[in-house]
């Protein structure tokens, strides 16, 4: 800006009359005034044009910034995999279905706002109840809401650390809330449940689990052959918690509990769970094991299932079974193939003799 733009206009005064010079006529005065007025009008017009130009430049800059934000978000979304969830549940030979599950490919509706540059949050969970279905149903209905309340918000740094704390707090809160409700009943509820939850933030997978339900990832890797073929690799995304594992048994014994026949006090098969209030004093805890994995274009699907599936399938066998169905002819649409693979896997577990409840979730991954 010109330094003098802010100074006031100098006052217009008549020149001193020279004693020797002629006096101006009325017509000359009028002409001079008209000329001065025209100069003022032109000056105001130039100032208005300059102001209008400044406003246009500011608007252009704002539009460019907004366009940059849109492009940045677009680039972010283009790197986010598309996830679809499929579920199959079988009661088996049990009198009651004690499993529960949740599929939320888009969890944004539960969150007040997505922090920073996150463009999508997904959530999937399998809960295998024992002693009744109340703990598994409670966890399925409430855990993701507690997660949404504790989820990081605003512009955040060190997102991994915040999400880890969020998951730990969420499991603790869900367990405490259920135990309060269970103890207030007459008679008190004795239900418990495993929990295997997969939280996907853009292309990063966070898995939190308690007990013996499991999550695995199918990834295709180059075989090294001349044909460039890729072979499936099964990656464990969760860790089992049962009292036969050394660290789990030691914790239970330090708390005053015992392990008999591979069970806590000879009864409970898992060493971590939601609920099971009568075993909490024996070292059974609700602190989940946490794992993280970044998705790639070579990833095919995530498989979550309760232990009913893994009693008759190894993780590798389950992955190969799913791939076999996906590669079968007849069904051209990928969604139909995944749905068929999910249903056939659960049915095959029952056919192989699993008497337990069986719940299977398949999460397809597409880039």
Image: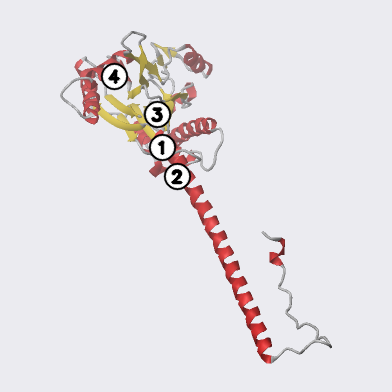
Identified at 37% across, 31% down, the residue is: 81
Label 2 residue SS: helix
Closer to viewer: mark 4 or mark 2: 2
Q: In the rendered image, which residue does mark 4 sit on?
A: 309
Q: Residue furthest bottom?
A: 26
Foreground residue among 361 and 264: 361
Give neighbour class at mark 2: few <14, some 14-19, many 20+ (Cα, 10 Å): few
Closer to viewer: mark 4 or mark 3: 3
Give neighbour class at mark 1: few <14, some 14-19, many 20+ (Cα, 10 Å): some
Label 1 residue SS: helix
Q: In the rendered image, which residue does mark 2 sit on?
A: 70
Does the residue at mark 3 contact the one at mark 1 (Cβ under 8 Å)? Answer: no
Disc nearer the start of the sequence (1/2): 2
Give neighbour class at mark 3: few <14, some 14-19, many 20+ (Cα, 10 Å): many
Query: Disc 3 versus disc 1: distance between alpha carbons?
Result: 20 Å
* Residue 28, x across and y down, in percent: 68, 87
Query: Disc 1 versus disc 2: distance between alpha carbons?
Result: 10 Å
* Residue 291, x across and y down, in percent: 46, 23
Disc nearer the start of the sequence (4/1): 1
- In the image, residue 142 sits, relative to residue 333, either above or below, namely below
Identified at 57% across, 59% down, the residue is: 54
Query: Disc 4 versus disc 2: distance between alpha carbons?
Result: 44 Å
Q: Quadrant of the N terminus?
A: bottom right
- Taking the image as drawn, is residue 86 in sight? yes
Closer to viewer: mark 4 or mark 1: 1
Query: Disc 3 versus disc 2: distance between alpha carbons?
Result: 29 Å
Foreground residue among 219 and 73: 73
| Mark identifier at residue 198 | 3
| Mark identifier at residue 77 | 1
Query: Disc 4 versus disc 3: distance between alpha carbons?
Result: 18 Å
Q: Quadrant of the C terminus?
A: top left
Foreground residue among 44 and 328: 44
């Amino acid at each position: 800006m010109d330094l003098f733009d802010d100074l006031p206009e100098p006052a217009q005064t008549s020149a001193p009359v020279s004693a020797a010079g002629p006096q101006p006529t009325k017509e000359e005065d009028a002409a001079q005034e008209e000329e001065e007025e025209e100069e003022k009008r032109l000056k105001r017009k130039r100032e208005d044009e300059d102001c209008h130009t400044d406003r246009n430049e500011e608007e252009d800059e704002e539009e460019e910034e907004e366009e940059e934000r849109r492009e940045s978000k677009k680039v972010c979304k283009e790197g986010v995999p598309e996830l679809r969830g499929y579920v199959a549940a079988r009661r088996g030979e049990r009198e009651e279905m004690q499993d529960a599950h949740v599929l939320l490919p888009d969890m944004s509706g539960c969150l007040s706002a997505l922090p920073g540059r996150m463009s999508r949050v997904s959530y999937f969970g399998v809960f295998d109840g024992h002693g009744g279905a109340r703990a598994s149903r409670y966890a399925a209905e409430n855990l993701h809401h507690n997660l949404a309340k504790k989820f990081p918000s605003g512009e955040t740094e060190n997102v991994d650390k915040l999400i880890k704390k969020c998951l730990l707090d969420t499991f603790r809160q869900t367990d405490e809330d259920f135990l309060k409700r269970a103890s207030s009943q007459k008679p008190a509820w004795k239900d418990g449940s495993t929990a295997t939850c997969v939280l996907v933030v853009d292309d990063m997978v966070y898995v939190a689990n308690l007990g013996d339900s499991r999550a695995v990832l199918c990834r295709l890797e180059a075989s090294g052959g001349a044909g460039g073929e890729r072979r499936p690799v099964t990656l464990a995304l969760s860790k089992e918690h049962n009292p036969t594992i050394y660290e789990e048994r030691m914790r239970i014994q330090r708390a005053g509990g015992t392990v008999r026949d591979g069970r806590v006090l000879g009864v409970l098969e898992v060493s971590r769970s939601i609920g099971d209030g009568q075993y909490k004093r024996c070292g059974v805890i609700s602190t989940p094991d946490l794992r993280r994995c970044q998705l790639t274009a070579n990833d095919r699907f995530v498989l979550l299932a309760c232990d009913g599936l893994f009693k008759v399938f190894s993780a590798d066998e389950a992955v190969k079974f799913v791939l076999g169905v996906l590669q079968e002819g007849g069904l051209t649409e990928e969604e139909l193939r995944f749905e068929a693979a999910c249903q056939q896997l659960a049915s095959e577990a029952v056919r192989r003799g699993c008497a337990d409840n069986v719940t299977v979730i398949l999460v397809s991954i597409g880039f």
